[in-house]
Image (cartoon, rainbow, N blue to C red):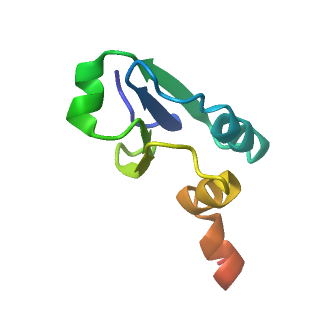
Amino acid sequence: MTCSGRGFVLLRLGPEAPDPFALAKVAKQRKMPLQVVTLGEPEVLQRYGRRFILVRPDGHVAWRGDEIPAHVEALVDRVRGRTLVKLFGDI
């Protein structure tokens, strides 16, 4: 699996990872390309230590956690750089 170039990849890890519907919905609303990949093997969760890993198009980890945040809009805006635009305006 490659995680570079086309969009963000949300890794959903472990056999009991929560549904990432809220994150996927907001990403779609914000026109942020997102692919959700579920890896159900317990060993993968043990290796990464979190149920969710959000990978940027350049392959760097943008966020990780065990639950989708309640304010998922803020997360999506932050990882795609919109919070900087809100602070400083379009440059």
Q: Is residue 63 above or below residue 10?
A: below
Residue found 38% across the figure and 16% down from its top: 40
Residue found 69% across the figure and 38% down from its top: 22
Tell me where residue 61 appears, x and y as whole percent.
37, 49
- Quadrant the N terminus occupies: top left
Residue 57's quadrant in the figure?
top left
Residue 55 appears left or right of 49: right
Tell me where residue 27 appears, x and y as whole percent.
68, 42
Residue 16's quadrant in the figure?
top left
Q: Residue furthest front?
A: 16
Q: Is residue 49 above or below residue 16?
A: below
**Could you say which is closer to the camera, residue 32 or residue 67?**
67
Residue 49 appears left or right of 56: left
Tell me where residue 38 appears, x and y as whole percent.
45, 20
Q: Is residue 8 above or below residue 73?
A: above
Residue found 45% across the figure and 28% down from its top: 12
Residue 61 appears left or right of 46: right
**Across the whole image, how many numbered discs are drawn on residues?**
0
Tell me where residue 14 appears, x and y as whole percent.
37, 23
Q: Residue furthest bottom?
A: 88
Residue 40 appears left or right of 25: left
Residue found 66% across the figure and 82% down from its top: 87
- Quadrant the C terminus occupies: bottom right
